[in-house]
Image: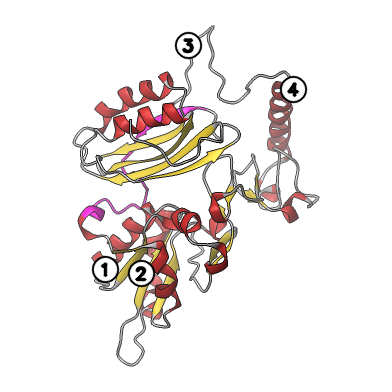
């Protein structure tokens, strides 16, 4: 097995990965990967598509190593990059391996990120690029992620989903790329782990934009490798697991999660009269009916009871009847 990064002091290793590759039959890859993950007590989500693989998984260091060894045998995945972090508690409830039309949904199926993505910029060189007055920095993440933290001076598209990005760019292109002194600006783009940047820079290239750059390894690699005193990152980075957010050095962040709408909640949100654990937060309170909130309260009650009894409520494996949850 290939060695992992040094997270062995924590009980769980978390591996975030993606790879744009060519899978002729992604469905045939699903079941063996699902079984291997379950056999090694790995949880999380892995997406397979004709364009490659994407996901985040967590488990023991040995179990993660076994799954990654298998993934490296898949077509075009031998040198897949993996971002490691650690967790004191299992950050996922169950294991899902799913086949999708895209490993990151943009609604632009004709793009070829393998061959047409922008130019990679290493984290140690990122500050110089985004500090250049001739560079436009664009955050390609969703609006609720940007609210948790972003790079100094970055443009926030305020898009609810990644699939909204192409329409936003086409609408804002002329304003964004207006030439100063006859020179077109450079465009620097970033996201959490790099996958959305590869696809969005490929999209800009398809739109005829020449100088497009993206942060190699995304925000997570930047926070892992760039010292905090030299960092141009402000705030925390939202992550799609039970850690909710991370800071410099990929340490646990301060945000919680609203289990009604799945959006991050700050300390200020937690103090709001509209916040009720498992039921509502300031962002979703007025978007739910009282009937829905009563249903959430009952779910929250059952989850608290399960924890008090030392058993899992969400994601528990049922042994007396066939489990019918989608994977």
Q: Magenta residues: mostly which secondary structure?
A: loop
Residue 112: % across, % down: 22, 54
Label for residue 308? 4
Classify mark 3: residues with Cα within 10 Å, few (<14), some (14-19) or many (20+).
few
First-in-chain label (1 vs 2): 2
Query: What residue is disc 1 on?
Result: 207
Q: Residue at x 70, y 50 (%)?
A: 286
Q: Locate residue 4 relative to residue 80 in the image: left or right.
A: right
Image quadrant in which the C terminus is located:
top left
Q: Is residue 78 above or below residue 163?
A: above
> Which tag, 4 or 2, sits closer to the chain's start?
2
Q: Earlier in the sequence, mark 3 or mark 1?
A: 1
SS at badge 4 = helix
The residues tagged by marks 2 and 3 sit, at their Cα atoms, a distance apart of 48 Å
**Which quadrant of the structure image shows residue 320?**
top right
Rendering quarter of residue 185:
bottom left
Callout 1: helix, strand or loop?
loop
**Magenta-colored span:** 94-114
Residue, x 34% and y 60% (percent of image)?
Answer: 200
| Residue 64: image location, x then y, percent | 42, 31
Residue behind mark 2:
170
| Residue appearing at x 53%, y 68% in the figure | 230
Q: Earlier in the sequence, mark 4 or mark 1?
A: 1
In this view of the protein, can residue 327 be seen by the observer? no
Q: Earlier in the sequence, mark 4 or mark 3?
A: 4
Residue hosting label 3: 322
């Amino acid at each position: 097995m290939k060695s992992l990064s040094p997270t062995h002091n924590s009980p769980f290793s978390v591996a975030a990965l993606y790879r744009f590759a060519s899978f002729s039959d992604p469905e045939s890859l699903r079941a063996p990967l699902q079984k291997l993950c379950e056999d090694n007590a790995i949880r999380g989500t892995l997406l397979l598509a004709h364009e490659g693989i994407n996901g985040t998984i967590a488990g023991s260091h040995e179990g993660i190593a076994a799954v990654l060894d298998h993934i490296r045998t898949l077509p075009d995945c031998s040198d897949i990059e993996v971002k490691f972090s650690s967790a004191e508690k299992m950050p996922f409830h169950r294991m899902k391996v799913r086949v999708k039309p895209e490993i990151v949904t943009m609604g632009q199926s004709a793009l070829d990120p393998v061959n047409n993505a922008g130019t990679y910029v290493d984290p140690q060189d990122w500050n110089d690029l985004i500090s250049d007055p001739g560079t436009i920095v664009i955050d390609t993440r969703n609006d609720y992620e940007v609210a948790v933290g972003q790079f100094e001076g970055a443009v926030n598209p305020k898009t609810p989903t990644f699939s909204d990005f192409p329409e936003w760019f086409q609408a804002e292109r002329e304003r964004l790329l207006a030439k100063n002194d006859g020179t077109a600006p450079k465009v620097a783009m970033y996201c959490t782990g790099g996958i959305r940047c590869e696809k969005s820079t490929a999209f800009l290239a398809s739109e005829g934009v020449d100088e497009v750059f993206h942060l190699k390894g995304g925000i997570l690699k930047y926070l892992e490798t760039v010292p905090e005193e030299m960092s141009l990152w402000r705030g925390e980075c939202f992550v799609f697991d039970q850690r909710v957010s991370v800071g410099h050095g990929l340490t646990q962040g301060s945000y919680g999660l609203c289990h009604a709408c799945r959006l991050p909640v700050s300390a200020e949100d937690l103090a709001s009269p509209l916040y009720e654990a498992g039921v509502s937060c300031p962002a979703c309170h007025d978007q739910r009916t009282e009937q829905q909130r009563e249903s959430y309260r009952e779910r929250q009650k059952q989850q608290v009871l399960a924890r008090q009894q030392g058993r899992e409520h969400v994601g528990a494996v049922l042994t007396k009847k066939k489990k019918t949850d989608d994977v």
